[in-house]
Amino acid sequence: MQQENQDSQVFTSYQKFVIFILAVTQFTVVLDFTVMSPLGDLMMKTLSITTSQFGMAVSAYAFSAGISGFLTAGFADRYDRKKLLLFFYIGVIIGTFFCAIAPNYHLLVAARIFTGIFGGVISSISLAIIADLFKLEQRGKVMGFVQMGFGLSQIIGIPFGLYVANHWGWQIPFYWIAIMAGFIAIALYLKLKPIAEHLKIQKANSAFQHLLNTLAPNKYRLGFLTTSLLSVGGFMIMPFGSAFAINNLKITNEQLPTLFMVSGITSFIMMPLVGKYSDKRNKFVIFTLATLMAIVVLNIYSNFSATPFIIVLITYVVMMFFIISRMIPGSALTTAIPEPKDRGAYMSITSSLQQMAGGVGAMIAGMIIVQKDNYAPLENFNLLTMIMSVIMLFTIYLMYRVNKNVMNNN
């Protein structure tokens, strides 16, 4: 039995390529989204836009991505996943290029909407590919490697985006992402094999009927609710993380890139190890432990006032490590819910709900957080983290039900 488990952990050379190409694809898509935040001040000044307008430009991506997920769900299992991935990835490249050449606010928002329509589906297609090509006992490790794209986007996105933009203009990071993604698209086209086994078990339903059929099963709805609440909890703190660090913890703008870079490097190194460990142990137990630790550190961090940078750095890195560590076993479990014939639609709906839930989380946070002026400390940040903690505790119960469902079907 032990030898069989060890064999299941060994990847073929082609599987290693799939993991790598999905990770770098995810990296460019996440980077395209995260690079907007560090460029905010420069873009607002260059394009003469207000903070509310910039916020709309950022959220335009999330909401268009969410709508796109629902609209494509019915078609997601009717095509070769390689072709689907290439189609939407090329759309991201075009949208990113449009962002770079946008001369004003309105065209920038249009470019972000266009990019979101295509970028919002990439993650769901990647998850469907992982579920198609890797066994359940391998998926935690695979998720860990693919999640490295998030960590790497923090390492490169914020420091590199700021450096390049300050020297050559805010447009250059978007050009760079588009060019890099272009080379990745070529590799996808040349090296990724067709992924079409799911087409052999498709029923002759319309795309709309397939969408309705995917929304119907109770176990699918459980997965949708779990994923949505995971995203709400995570996104509630993100929009105000930088403002809290500067105005409440009194770190400087020059220290801020270091905060994100060190956190990103830690995630980049540790995520594959967390994924590998979750495959060897009970995924639900790993999820529960990571969630409980995240709640503890989160509430400590939110009650800091002016604090030495080294303490802020260590606490923030540990907090983000546990928050992200929840997502690896959680994603591995939720990808085991759908039947092969429904995976594409299920993942599309999941991705859509993640995007929309993130937008809802940011809106809720905006209603809770109060700042009297641009330089005043944020108020109610600790209340926000307490609400997050309640949501995170509820996700443990939901993930327990997901885990029970998965174990009963395997």
Image (spheres, helix red, strand yellow):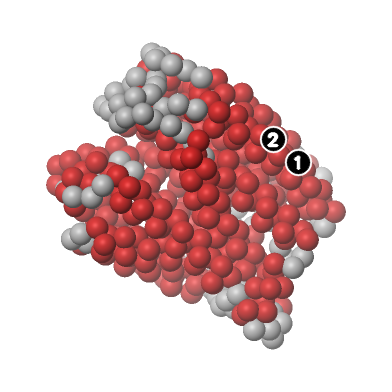
Crowd class of label 1 (few under 14; some 14 to 19; many from 20; radius 10 Å):
few
Residue 383, given in percent of the width and then of the height, sits at 55, 28
Residue pointed to by mark 1: 397
Q: Residue at x 32, y 65 (%)?
A: 110
Q: In which quarter of the image is the C terminus?
A: bottom right
Residue pointed to by mark 2: 393
Q: Residue at x 39, y 20 (%)?
A: 249
Disc 2 residue type (three-letter): Leu
Residue situated in front as seen by the camera: 140 or 111: 111
Disc 1 residue type (three-letter): Tyr
Asked whether the beta carbons under mark 1 and mark 2 sit within 8 Å of each other, the answer is: yes
Q: Which residue is drawn at 66% across and 56% down?
A: 224
Q: Residue at x 56, y 35 (%)?
A: 323
| Mark 1 to mark 2 CA distance (whole Å) | 7 Å
Instruction: Answer yes or no: is residue 138 visible.
Output: no
Residue 200, located in which quarter of the rendered image? bottom right
- Helix, strand or loop at disc 2? helix
Residue 153, given in percent of the width and then of the height, sits at 39, 44
Q: How many marks?
A: 2
- When the figure is inspected, residue 343 is found, relative to residue 237, above or below; the finding is below
- Residue extending furthest left? 168
Left or right position of 45 against 183 = left
Left or right position of 191 against 10 = left
- When the figure is inspected, residue 24 is found, relative to residue 215, above or below; the finding is above
- Helix, strand or loop at disc 1? helix
Left or right position of 138 against 100 = right
Instruction: Answer yes or no: is residue 167 visible.
Output: yes
Residue 235, given in percent of the width and then of the height, sits at 51, 43
Residue situated in front as seen by the camera: 153 or 34: 34
- When the figure is inspected, residue 400 is found, relative to residue 288, above or below; the finding is below
